Amino acid sequence: MNWAVIMAGGSGTRFWPESRAGRPKQFLTLAGKKTLFEQTLERIRPVVGPSEWLVVTTRDHARQARKLSGLKPSQILAEPVGRNTAPCAILAADFLLRRDPEAVLAILPSDHLIRKAKVFQKALRLAFDAARETRLPVTFGVRPVSAHTGYGYLESGALYQKSRGFEIRRLKRFHEKPDPAKARAFLTSGRFYWNSGIFVWRAADLLDAARKYMTGAWRISRSMWKGNFAANMRRRYPAMPAISMDYGLMEKLPSILTIPVDMDWHDLGGWHAMKMLWDKDRDGNAVRGNVLLVESEGNIVKGDSKRLIALLGAKDLVVVDTPGALLICAKTQSESIRKIVSELKDRKEHRYL
Amino acid sequence: MNWAVIMAGGSGTRFWPESRAGRPKQFLTLAGKKTLFEQTLERIRPVVGPSEWLVVTTRDHARQARKLSGLKPSQILAEPVGRNTAPCAILAADFLLRRDPEAVLAILPSDHLIRKAKVFQKALRLAFDAARETRLPVTFGVRPVSAHTGYGYLESGALYQKSRGFEIRRLKRFHEKPDPAKARAFLTSGRFYWNSGIFVWRAADLLDAARKYMTGAWRISRSMWKGNFAANMRRRYPAMPAISMDYGLMEKLPSILTIPVDMDWHDLGGWHAMKMLWDKDRDGNAVRGNVLLVESEGNIVKGDSKRLIALLGAKDLVVVDTPGALLICAKTQSESIRKIVSELKDRKEHRYL
């Protein structure tokens, strides 16, 4: 059967002050009326029904994930601490393989935005079939529309097959976030895709690879089911290596597939990304809430509907107004919000974190 | 006797959003813990006691003025509408002359900051004596410390007398707010002083001048006491010409005195002026409230103690956070805050005004 493993363990600070510890990115409503987590579930639903969903999150967010998803407790795996994507995928594969020896898993981040859901769904169906048939992992590439330096890239190789309007290609190599020159070269070459972090793989094949290339993690995972699962998780999971699926497992394999999917995908890296999502006025301001702009250009402002935010002669600022804290940040610096968060940590101002 | 007439009718927008309609500048606590109005009263008290105070304000602010001053209702004259300083001074002189034919009035704005109260008090005593003796109006000049283009200037002439450590000079001419070149020339000449708007004059002499040079206003004032004063004010005061004391009355006179007083005087023209008053950090930020600054320079930030305001990479901004409205303004534009206020008026957003 086809299963969806939704990874919801992320804990970012890039959307401070909205993303306090209790509300990492996947639980924010940055675009649309629902959280990115809920949008992820809605997007999967036409391909994989809720009874075949498994959410992996951290203990701190298990309750929130359960509430938003409506899933049964048995469909939520709660990590005592986050350990990146490889341990999470290995554990999920192990868990599901025990129920379904033929399980094929789509493993998906829940903090990304995908605006062409139909295209995603078509590609997901194709990827399930391809993974089952080829027994290879299938990654999702996104044709780059800019020389983005905040994303990882997939370098594609030979065409493997054309099917249902998609190309399935051999994956040549994973590339980490490039510098600007490299990103420009990637953009113009036509062979490089943004790495969406989504992959589809047979659970049995994933675990075979884990046994071979991440033996320690594989062993920890196997040991979870001897005795009390919850107690084992608490005690043993922290020993997992914090390593991503790409680098811990997939890079080691001789053969991987990739499907380029034009699904209008975005990994929102911070408030500056909102300029792409929200309507802009003719002066390039993207605003939400009760905002008055006078002689102001290129600002991103998020308030609520009651309080008035008035900008006069302001240029290229990010302004985020929440009940407990207000952020005013130069747009060029909006990727450095962690500096504020770490300063608050130093000062032990936990109520703002 | 010596009397103090405190003018508290101003209604500015330069300190929006703190200075909503209900709280013009004189009723704000911009420097120190008390409002500028209260500071004005405290400063006068050692020279003129409260029983010789008269506050002239607009009807909207009469209650506030009474509450802050602790004066009797009979010591508050409430204008139905503001009509600049000349009608206010004529009315006050008329009112006090009926009680005290020898009254000498110090007429003082209540929205200025004077940080050397002792010097002011010494000069005020001297001015009372000089006005009584010479029967001329005595103005207070302030030695300019910058080529300020937001102030009016007094051009001084010949020395009239040296007394108690002060010079009393002839006033040659009033000058309106100069352009930058003129302001620089004024600054270097040494003969020009900032016009503090304070003057001292015998009530009888002031009314003589009014009868001669502002006959209409003088007549309206005289008519107030025939019948019901409050009803007369409501009906007749709006017919007063809106004109300042300097230009309506004093400029017409052949002879005026001026005392240069180094009293650290400021007419706070807007939020940008706070950089002068508040402690600055080594990056030139002047802040009040719970403010976190990271890589930010030259900002003026006013919040409250609870909400956190975090600035990251922000430069030369004015940020004023109030419960109902938040202002973010380029420092260079902070004299244009009326643009926000007029935009809010256009939109009929009265709750923010």
Image (tube, coloured by chain):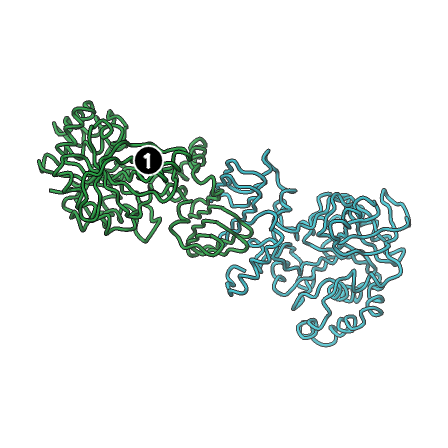
Chain colours: A green, B cyan
Answer with the quarter of the image where residue A267 lies. top left
Quadrant in which the N terminus of chain B appears: bottom right
Vertical comparison of B156 with B66: above or below:
above
The image shows residue B232 at horizontal and vertical percentages of 69, 74
Q: Is residue B173 above or below residue A346?
A: below
Residue in view at x 61 percent, y 38 percent: B279
The picture places residue B168, in percent across and down from the top left corner, at 87, 49
Q: How crowded is mark 1: few (under 14 residues within 10 Å), some or many (20 or more)?
A: some
Question: Between B41 and B296, which is closer to the camera in this rendering?
Answer: B296
Residue B247 location (% of width, % of height): 79, 62
The single residue placed furthest to the top in the displayed view is: A216
Quadrant containing the C terminus of chain B in the rendered view: bottom right
Of A19 and A201, which appears nearest the observer? A201
Quadrant housing residue A184: top left
What amino acid is labelled 1 in the image?
Gly
Taking B109 as reference, is A1 left or right?
A: left
Subunit bearing disc 1: A
| Rendering coords of residue A204 (x, y %) | 12, 32
Compared to residue A238, the image places residue B6 above or below, namely: below
Q: In this view, does A192 lie to the left or right of A89?
A: right
User: Disc 1 designates what residue?
Assistant: A152
Residue A254 left/right relative to B239: left
Residue A83 in view (yes/no): no
Please identify the quarter of the rendering in which residue B187 is found.
Answer: top right
Q: Can residue A141 be seen in this view?
A: yes
